[in-house]
Every structure is written in structure tokens, then in C-alpha cells.
Amino acid sequence: MNRTRGRPRRSSDAPAAVGQRIELTLQRLTHDGRGIGSWQGRTVFVEGGLPGELVTARVVRARSKLIEARLDTLRQPAPERVEPRCRHADLCGGCNQQHIAHDLQITIKQQTLAQQLQHFAGLQPERWMPPLLGPAYGYRQRTRLAMRWDARSGRLEVGYRQRASSDLVEISECPILAAPLEALIKALPDVLRSLDARQSLGHVELIGGLFPALVVRHLRPLSANDLTALGELAQQHQVSLWLQGSDADQPTPEGAAQTPAYALDDQQLRFEFAPGDFTQVNADINQAMVNQAIAWLGLQPGERVLDLYCGVGNFSLPLARQGAFVAGIEGSDEMVLQAQHNAGLNALAQTHFCQADLSKRLADDVLAQRYHAALLDPPRDGAETLVAALAEHGIGRILYVSCNPATLARDAGVLAGKGYRLVQAGIMDMFPQTAHVEAMALFVSGKDKS
């Protein structure tokens, strides 16, 4: 009889094998939308599963007490399950929550923000604010498609990365894209496969807004035939063509290409940007987010505001439109120039933009300007050093726009430790059909009771 050291090995002691199918009932959800259940005393995370469902799942990773799996067979569905609108949803690594009813997606995101604030900072806001909601599909204003030449089949693959894989999902639709971009994405692959340079293409980016753009990254020069084919495609879909060669840092316009731009209609503002600049992908939520920031800060004309990670001026210019004096700081020199350009474009002279390394503490002379409020919209790693400096200089109101609840919660703890109240917070559904959680939080110093 086979024995382990000291005692017989029971079947429940054996770890599940990768590829093995296991049957279980799911009880709850993770913050990223995976179902959680148990099998032979082990916790199982099932991608694609929902609470209350009886499923057969295929193991993709197994440890002694933890199993990660993907839904294989749905034996008993939950009422919250919906049919994904995109035929590529099972493989594509982009939108992993299309099977979840949109109302439940919002609930999950709200719970995630609350749990992270409690876990990392022991905080709950004085007021939970309603979520900012927009269209569940057709919202995305930019996307990047990968390309790969398959030498064995002699064929160019065009699509998105598969979930947990470097392989591509060749797509024929993408219903989260704004309608003009989805129409372009359906026609694009055949044109790319016809190019002389098809074996040396890098990626393609589609950008929406007032003047949509098609950006093609190519690793060797394009022939005259290639330029004609791409130009005809761009003209047919009423987009500007931009090209980026292997030796170019930035894309350059081809022909009479218009500079990409977007608008904030409520503030009567227009923003121009280069194809590589960061802009929000969801126009409806961006407008609602800007409106909410203005309302939450409650600025009076003449107050001074510091806008950190200001980008092309997405918050700076609306705040200036309210009569505030705004200083915008950004890590990129190019983005600073673009923000300055947009301020001039909109005739907003009460703005000042400069470059600084925002991963480090700001110079004391910057923070010595006695700002009444600060707004920051940092990347995923947050802004721990910056919020500490803002607090030390006694800025009364700090509005934090976050794309990562964990680092928002960490930084909230820093502010709470320096006497700030978390007055209100809420999520913004910037990326429907995904687990990404965007949030806004308002902190007020103990001395500022506004």
C-alpha cells in the first residue's frame, strides 16, 4: 500500500491537477468578479462564475489550499447572469464581466471601494454618494489592437490579447467601442493583411472624439500602395491617419490629418491632444466626473486650486471656467505644453502649468502658495508622498480621483492620520463590463468645516 510519510494519504489531501474538472457551488464574488466556492476543503476561485451557481470548472492553477479555475460547464445559472453581447467575451482579456448584469457590476464596485477603505485605512466616508453611470456599451473612445505575423500560416493576426495569454483573439466586433470606432475595427483587419508591410506592423490605435484618428505603428517603411490603402480606409471612415515608424517617438500626421480633440460641452471647452497623450476613454463619465468635481469642491471665484497630474487640462480648465486660479502640474513636458495650448485655445488666462516629478515630494515653494483646494488624479500606484505634503501645508479641501481603490485607501489613511475627514466618496463607472474601479473622494481638514 502506498503511504505518505507517517500516515496514509487521503484523496482529499491530493492537490487538484491543472486541467482537471471539478464540480462545486459558488457562494460569493471576489472584487474582480470571480466566483468563490470550496472543493474538498480548498477555496476555489472560478473565473466566469457567479454566486449561487452550480458549475463544473477547469483547474488552471492549484496550490495546497487554493485553486484557480475557469468556468467549463454551467449546470445551474444565477438570475444575475446575462448573455455577453460580444462573441469574443470568453477568450478576450478585455471585458471579463459581460456575463454579469450591469446593476450587479455596480454593486461589486461599490463593495470593493468600501472594503478597501475599511481594510487599509479603517475608514468609511461620512456620506456615500450615488455612482456616476453611463452607457454599458458603446462608450470607449480609444483602443489599441495588437498584430502578429504567423509565419507558419503566412497570415497577419489582428486583435486583442487573450485572457492570461500572449496569444491574440482575432476580433470581428467590439461592442464596448463607440460606434464609429467599432465600424472601423470591422474593416481594418482585411486592409492591414493586404499591405506590403504586413509582416512588420507593430500595433494600431483607434482614437475617437471630435476628430477621430487611426494610428499605425510600422517597423519598416510603408510603400506607396500601403499609404494609398490606409488613406482610403481613413477617408472612408472619416478618420485622420497617423503613422509611427520604428525610429519615431511620436506618431506624425499623414496628409491633412486633424489633431485629435474632445469637448466638455457643459463647460463649453475643447481640448486638443497628441495621439500618445492620456485622455479619459469614456466621454459621458468624463463629463459627469468633471461636473461632480466642480460641485464637490464648491469653489468661489478667486480661490486658488492646485491640480496634480493635470494632463491636458481636463480638470484645470473647467475649474478655471468657474473663476478659480489654477496651477496644474504634470510629469511630462509634452503634456504641460498641451495643457498650456488648451488654456490658450479656450481663452483661460487664470491658469499656470509646469512640469515636476510627481513621484517625489513637491518643492516647498510650490506648496507655499496658500492653495484653498487641491485636486489629484494619480496613476494606479497612488500619491502617498504628495498627499502627505498637501496635508502638511494645510490645504483645506483635497479631491482625490482614483483608478485603484487600494492605493486610494492607503492614501486616505495618510490623510486621516493628519486630521482630515473623508467627507464623501463614490464610484464612477468609467469601464463598464470590466473589474476596473474608478472613484472620487473628498477630504476636508479639521480646520475647514466647509
Image (cartoon, grey):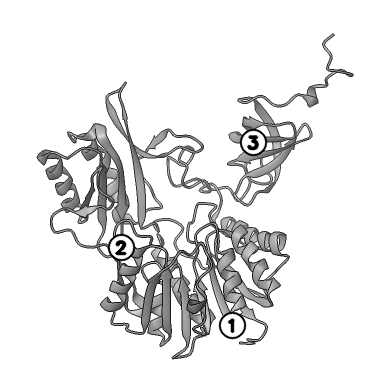
Looking at the rendered structure, which numbered label has been put on residue 209? 2
Return the disc, 1 or 2, that comes first in the chain's sequence: 2
Q: Residue at x 30, y 64 (%)?
A: 273
Local crowd at mark 2 within 10 Å, few (<14), some, or many (≥20)? some
Counting other residues with Cα less than 10 Å from the Cα at mark 1, is it few (<14), some (14-19), or many (20 or more)?
many
Three-letter code, disc 2? Gly
Closer to us: 387 or 92: 387
**Foreground: 348 or 133?**
348
Q: Residue furthest bottom?
A: 301
Residue 265: x, y in percent?
34, 75
Q: Which residue shows up at 23% across the image and 63% down it? A: 259
Point out which mark residue 396 bears: 1
The answer, for residue 130, to whether it is visible in the render is no
Compare residues 171 and 75 and report the one nearer the observer: 171
Q: For mark 3, what is the residue?
A: 68
Q: Quadrant of residue 46?
A: top right
Could you tell me which secondary element the residue under label 1 belongs to? loop
Q: Is residue 178 in view?
A: yes
